[in-house]
Image: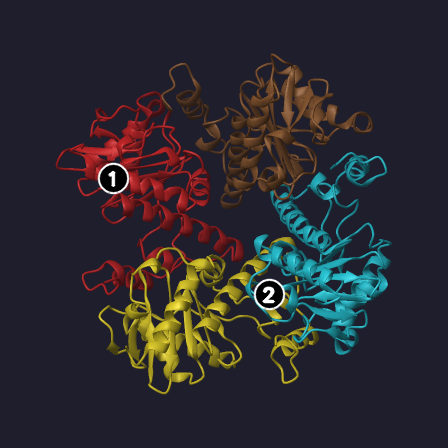
Chain colours: A yellow, B cyan, C brown, D red
């Protein structure tokens, strides 16, 4: 049995959630699970349908994008995952989908405004949309650069990856992360729901206003603060 | 067996309907069932996935929000339920979700106009949206205050909780209630359907007009009046 | 066994299709099946959930709306069905739902424009929306009057119920019919699809134009004309 | 066993995917699979529900539209398939549906703008909408002419069927193709997803801009170029 069995299984289980949560069709998405001590992550093989996946088919890759174990080619987005793991020591899982509403916001190149407490339960600010890459970045190692596009956007907006676990890559689609692969997938589903509600909110009331700071802080802190009282 | 077994089971069954009716993802919703004679209600534990629920995991709470029986922490919205039960003697069940369309209306801070008989089968007026809470109310006991926000809105609009069993909490999401927990869940599903149709109506015809009073009264009375002829 | 067993079974099977086709939630819809020789029809009992239905629970009613056989109260819309059967000798089944998009068009009080061949495969003109009832009609026998509202609309627009098997009742919802109950349900599902596509068409292109007559005739006749070549 | 068993089975399997992928209701769609060596293709019989299909019920037709083997009448769109196979030697499968969003774009008579990488993963330009047919073409052999309508549109826009495997037929609905029937169905599902996202993108940002050429080339080439690194 592989010494990376735990992350193989975590990545497998998390990938299998994507079609159940209606976040992907065909092979349009990938989840990885990292082991920071070993400096590697397990990721979905490229272009393999979800029904054909198994823990053994996950590919083990290091944080520079080199395949460490596995016979299949890893997801074409592997280098984006690698960059994020290398620079974010507390990220244990990353999820990338082309889910309908979040992708439409990414294509629109707009941040998702914080219109309600569903959003505030998870984030205290608008969900950022990283501006499209420059031509030079695209011409370089595109997937590595996508990782830096994400990190740069967080930096410019003065956000920590610890607080903001979701981002829209302009013209492309969302990436989300978390302390586990399962949490990363959870964040993708939450993002999709927030993205749909935000569009509907603007359609119902074109003059809809952002949430007041007081309510944002209250909802976020009751779930995430030191005195949080959500969950068990 | 708990002396509250009947409300444990009613609350459990009603909570389990939420994912089947596509009203929640993950743990985004909670239903409670009250026993007014005993002065308590059974409510979903906080943050527990629906698949892991059972009648025994429901938490028994009194109308001041104190836990009476149960090992788990009750829903973070428990105090809102407590306030409503304390002030509404005929309410036997309360349901809270972040269902997509009703939440979008809440985020838009608009009442849902009465555009058709689907709406009039259940209510004779627009479905109210309670204005967002003041900063002082948020800084206090937030969930208790949400209960008063709902009661105040009904009072300001001269509505009885007996007639209007659904409300949008501005910037947040819907709450519904009824004589049983099952009826409260039914009302949440009806509200979601009305909310979607109302947006579509405005998109098809921006000059859509409200229903005439004569038709409102006819539809409401054939289901709810003294001479109603709906159902068995 | 009831002498009306054949229409009991036809009505039962057709009603059971409604939730499968996502045309209803709870008890929001009813289908009937007529036997014109006997002058009666079988219809869903009022307010009974679909899972509890059986052929034996269907109610047999004559074309004046009198119950002929059955212990349960028939659908509250029974008199509308009765009027239509009485005046339309070739109608063998009628279906009424509050399906989302068709109901939104009804609430908008707009005919559905004929924007494509999906529409032209079934109708050669816009799907009519009957204008809301006058106060006098509402104050009378409301459900009988709904039947006349439908017949009057067809007459005013110079349409035969043989050609146009679907209508929107303004402020209310759609009614459809056909030579069998199964066909009536088919028409409700087709109407819902046409209604959704028509709204999307206007959203994609606010200047979208109706289909040319030549294409309308071609598509309709290849399915319905003397030289039709659709089906077996 | 039929000498065309391989294409009977390919066409059957591909047709059965349509309802699973939510691309059709009832019998609104058809897929065919061609054998260019034998000069024939297998296609769905007309008006037969998907649940009643079997490989044996597929109809074998030559590239002029003549039935070669089979007892049932082939799809009413058969001649469109025949024209495309006759003029496109590398097309092994063709799929036609009335899927909701793609059909709405066809009814709107607009090309689908290339707004993101989901689109660029499959095409380097807007997805074309063939302008509606002239009255003379409609009055002729309509389905043959639909084939030429598609081929003419590709020619006018200087596109090869090898690169662009999807098209909207104005006022009608989409056609897609590929080297196999399975790939043609895949393309129909991808098109439906792209069509929905493009509308949402314009709703979120009416000033949304098309993708830059550099990003289009990068995404298309990583999946389809000589040095592609997608899949196994």
Question: Residue B53 occupies which quadrant of the picture?
Answer: bottom right
Q: Position of residue C95 (x, y in %)?
A: 60, 30
Helix, strand or loop for disc 2 = loop
Tell me the residue at 50%/81% (across/down): A162
Quarter of the image with the N terminus of chain A is bottom left
Given residues D22 and D172, the one toward you in this image is D22
Question: Number of numbered discs present?
Answer: 2
Q: Nearer the viewer, mark 2 or mark 1?
A: 2
Residue C88 in view in this figure: yes
Q: Is residue B48 above or below residue B177?
A: below
Circle 2 packing at 10 Å, graded few (<14), some (14-19), many (20+), is some
Question: Residue C223 occupies which quadrant of the picture?
Answer: top left
Q: Which chain contains the residue that carries disc 1?
A: D
Q: Position of residue C159 (x, y in %)?
A: 59, 19
**Quick one: which residue is furthest to the top in this view?**
C37
**Quick one: which residue is furthest to the front in this view?**
B1
Quarter of the image with the C terminus of chain A is bottom right
Q: Position of residue D49 (x, y in %)?
A: 40, 33
Q: Which chain contains the residue that carries disc 2?
A: B
Query: Which label number is shown at residue C158?
Result: none
Tell me the residue at 32%/60% (across/down): D216
Tell me the residue at 56%/71% (across/down): A126
Residue on which the image places disc 1: D9
Residue on which the image places disc 2: B53
Q: Position of residue C142 (x, y in %)?
A: 77, 28
């Amino acid at each position: 049995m592989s010494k990376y069995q735990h992350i193989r299984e975590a990545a497998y289980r998390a990938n299998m959630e994507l079609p159940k949560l209606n976040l992907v069709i065909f092979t349009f998405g990938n989840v990885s699970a990292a082991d920071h001590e070993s400096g590697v992550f397990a990721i979905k093989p490229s272009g393999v349908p979800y029904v054909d996946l198994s823990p053994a088919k996950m590919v083990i890759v290091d944080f520079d994008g080199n395949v460490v174990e596995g016979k299949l080619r890893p997801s074409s987005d592997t280098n984006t995952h690698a960059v994020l793991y290398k620079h974010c020591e507390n990220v244990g899982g990353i999820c990338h989908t082309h889910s309908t509403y979040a992708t439409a916001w990414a294509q629109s190149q707009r941040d998702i405004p914080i219109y309600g407490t569903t959003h505030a339960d998870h984030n205290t600010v608008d969900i950022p949309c990283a501006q499209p890459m420059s031509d030079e970045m695209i011409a370089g190692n595109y997937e590595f650069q996508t990782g830096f596009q994400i990190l740069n956007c967080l930096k410019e907006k003065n956000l920590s990856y610890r607080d903001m676990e979701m981002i829209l890559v302009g013209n492309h689609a969302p990436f989300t992360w978390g302390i586990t692969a399962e949490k990363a997938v959870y964040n993708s589903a939450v993002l999709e729901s927030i993205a749909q509600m935000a569009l509907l909110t603007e359609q119902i009331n074109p003059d809809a206003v952002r949430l007041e700071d007081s309510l944002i802080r209250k909802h976020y802190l009751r779930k995430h603060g030191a005195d949080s009282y959500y969950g068990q």
